[in-house]
Amino acid sequence: MLPLVALLLRAPWGSLGKLLSEDEVRTALRLSLECATAATVISLALGVPLAWVLARAKLPGLAFIRAVVTLPLVLPPVVGGIALLLALGRSGVVGRYLDQWFGVTLPFTTAGVIVAETFVAMPFLVVTVEGALRSADRDLEEAAVTLGASRLTVFARVTLPSIVPSLLAGSILCWARALGEFGATITFAGNFPGTTRTMPLEIYTQFQQDPPAAEALSLVLLFVAVLVLALLRDRWLRGPAAS
């Protein structure tokens, strides 16, 4: 707790309001919130079906797929950013075709920020939802099938409602991880004001120019982290009985 206490004690609280009123800081905060939210929405669209496959499907090589999906959890973010450049850059394995065929360029754009954040944050959602699907009561699903419900209907009306707490927890974790992403973002999307400079990058930039300002802005992300812990407290900090 020492680093956190030091931040709370030494941060210039008085200048926080002035800093948050500056255009560059407000733009970075807005960009962070928008990109983190977009990354979470994409993660939900891709991650929930993927979690279902990992939890329920009987496919060869499923263990390998799970390992690949969870790799960003332990992969250094800078390495992830380099991998994204090699895959989706203008001369990348896939990026060259996106550029030539569709005129789409992802690196050093706001869309690139969302891609980088999705890459590092989605595994948090997948792991949480997969665990919930594995522990869900299958009897209700089988009963719905015997009554004539289709698999899609069973998933939408039985399975999904039963994992809502885990889905919310995974979404919050995913959003918080995306909000705090730095390494993959600066490597793949760069650090351009108003376009790719999110709050973590703004703090990094301020730290090079005005360390007290960076300390004050760090309080914003510290507040977000505390809020996330508060939202997840009943599910994790009080044990299974609370959920």
Image: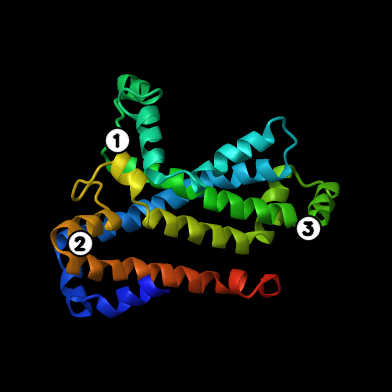
- Which of the marked residues, 1 or 2, is nearer the chain's N terminus? 2
- Residue 55: quadrant of the picture: top right
Relative placement, left or right, of 63 versus 231 is right
- The residue carrying mark 3 is 137
Residue 107 numbered tag? 1
> Which sits earlier in the primary sequence, circle 2 or circle 3?
2
Report if residue 111 is visible in the image. no
Q: Residue at x 68, y 31 (%)?
A: 61
Left or right relative to 131: residue 210: left
> Percent position (x, y) of residue 76?
42, 45
Q: Residue furthest front?
A: 2
Q: Is residue 203 above or below residue 241?
A: above
Give the colouring mode of the picture: rainbow
Q: Which residue is mark 2?
A: 25
Looking at the picture, which amino acid does disc 2 mark?
Answer: Val
Identify the residue at horizontal 31%, vertical 73% (top origin).
Answer: 7
Residues at marks 1 and 2, CA–CA distance in whole angstroms: 22 Å
Which amino acid type is marked by label 1?
Pro
Q: Position of residue 176 (x, y in %)?
A: 43, 60
- Give the side of residue 91 with respect to residue 38, left or right: left
